[in-house]
Image (cartoon, rainbow, N blue to C red):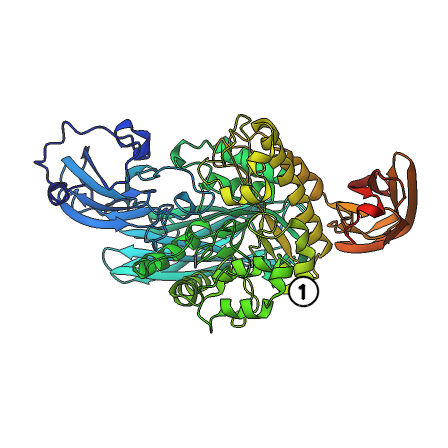
Amino acid sequence: MDLHLKRVGADADLDDASWPGIEVPGHWGQTEEFATHDGPLLYRRGFTHRAPVDDERLWLRFDGVLGGAEIWLNGSYIGDTSTYFATHRFDVTDLLATDGDHLLAAEVSCPDQRGDEPRTSLTGSLQAGHLAPAGNPGGIWQPVAIDSTGPVAIQHARLLCTAAEPDLAELTIRLVLHANDRAEVRVDTSVSGPDGPAGGGGQQHALASGENRIEWTVPIEEPRLWWPASLGEQPMYDVSVTVRVGDGQGGDGQVSDRREWRTGLRKITTDDFIWRVNGSRLFAKGIVAGPRGRFLNRIEAAELAQDMQAVRDAGLDLVRLYGHIGRVETYREADRLGLLIWQDLPLVGRFSSKARSATRTMARAAVDHLGHHPSVGLWCAHNEPNGHREHRQGRSSRSVGAGAAGGSAEAAVDRSAGGLAERWPALDAVRQAGANLRPSWNRSVFDPIVARELRNADRTRRVINRSGSPPGPADPTGSDSHLWLGWRTGEANNLGQLIRRWPRLGVFLGGIGSQSATIADWDRDAPTWPGAHPDAFARYLPRTAYASGEAWAHATQTYQGDLLRSHIETIRRLKYRPAGGFLVTALADVSPEGGFGVLQADRTEKPAYNVLVDACRPVIVVAEPPPPVVVAGQELALAVHAVSDLQTPLSSVRVTARVHGPSWTHRVAWEGEIPADVCQWIGELRCTVPHTPQQLHIDLELVSGQLVASNRYSTVVIPESESLG
């Protein structure tokens, strides 16, 4: 937008007859003239409205603008928006004081955020990170309207469940009321549960002119608690708050404003990433979900429900909304289905210091917007604040991170690894993740500011400063580990060895996955779809190694499933010792050509989805994976475990292991009981590998009453003469 238009854009005399029309609500990329535009754009709209009557106040409401807007009404500047998911209301009573025609103008900006420069726009994974949709999402994507209130209006409202015990729960409500003059008000609260009225009452308040903050609690006796689906039911409560002015002693004063919420009563803690809901421990099996598309207004509620149902059908408890705050339907569906949400703020990568003030406002707005949802279990302030170092083919593991200062935390990781990384590539994962250990303005200043704002606004949930940082000397707990073994570095089967050497890395695994292709006619060049990782494909799945594009695409999908199975089984074997859970990346592809998803962009299942379902069943039986090849006559010894997420023990359990090939079979069985919610060591499967070269299968089966769990591993027997010694 040129400077002249910026100066005169709000003038009533400006001739805009030739301007193209843009649908509101909508995104400018949906209009042909602006399909590839990065903005800013000037929106103008004339409308007719009546004047306010008596003590009525009129408010201009923007329900959502991507990424921000400066707003004028009748040529007067009235304010700006900076938080794309939150509602912004502006008092326009004086500007609409007369009946007739009015002019609204809004300069909407959503600058490109896909480069390496520090960001300022708070659009998160809508524009940054490996799950960002292509194109600019800018626009007024939610409705714009004029609201009417009495002389006292609710500017901000927040509802939190601050206590949840079997005999008593407690809701805390916080309102910011704006009065146009001193006033006496009555605030009435009503709570209705699945069994009828559950609590409430009224209270008088004397308000000063301007902003007034009030807070109170509502006790609920004998509550019905909300649980994740794997632990119980999901009863919900309806809460309403009504502000009355005038003769409010009997509750019959004039209704000035009101708010309503639908909530659930529960207590969630995540000490050291061990989740507990209402006191019951839960091993959190989860998946990462990015935005369903850049045009948020076009996403149907049924599509959002489909995604949440796919998560639940996979046997998962947790969904991470990666770098974005989603549509309200996502949270309502998670509440209904009993899914927990790891909620990121829309902060991905490095940010400029110019974003500090807006980010603090956004953190408070996020709590106001989502705090009442029982599914929201954890806040994450920032994802990979120092950015992410992609693996570069041909770079030795020793050279990764070589630019760090000698006294930095990253350099300390390099020194502690010593020369082991040359002999053991899994340590390269630590060094690559170590990019987020370096002191920086984002990590050391920005993240604590944002996290502190979240903690001050919501003391009922765990807040982590950042995601993707391994533990370090100054931050021993760190956050979830983004190791990307088998994709950005190392091999998938390195995970168990790495966690044995550094247990803190296994507390919560947040980087699991690989990309796979969904198009069969790829030529022999490296994959080129948006967001593809050509270096990773070149290292693990080079296109030139396959005779056809179809064979290569099939191989990428098989590899993705095998990698997920290996990681999930390993981390489940480490249940609570030290692992509290994991997050698979990701639910669905961003591009039709492929991606990290276990579902394609059109939500067709990839093979990895069914692998995920099998690996995340409540009860699984697993063995330590055998090596890809074994030598004839070798002694094979594999530990066998059963993992149960059930809250009740299993009795009369029989586990059978059968090692077999075309000409040889070995069988062993164990019997006993498995306690609730444990990883139970069953025994050690020992055998001497047959001397005949052949493929061996290791079949496991667990039976307890009607419950049956099974698993299979394979290896190849080679002659002793072919052994590498």
For residue 668, above or below residue 449:
above
- Position in image of residue 293 (x %, y %): 43, 36
- Residue at the (24%, 42%) spot, across then down: 40
Name, please, the residue furthest toward the front. Answer: 721
- Residue at the (15%, 42%) spot, across then down: 2
In the rendered image, the quadrant that contains the N terminus is: top left
Name, please, the residue furthest toward the left. Answer: 13
**Residue 12 shown left or right of residue 201 in the figure:** left
Dot 1 alpha-carbon crowd within 10 angstroms: few under 14, some 14 to 19, many 20 or more = few
Foreground residue among 121 and 659? 659
- Position in image of residue 379 (x %, y %): 49, 56
- Residue at the (41%, 61%) spot, across then down: 450
Residue 308: name its quadrant: top right
Q: Which residue is mark 1?
A: 501
- Position in image of residue 118 (x %, y %): 34, 55
- The reply to whether residue 505 is visible in this rendering is no
Report the amino acid beneath label 1. Arg
For residue 20, above or below residue 621:
above
- The reply to whether residue 84 is visible in this rendering is yes
- Position in image of residue 256 (x %, y %): 32, 48
Foreground residue among 284 and 538? 538
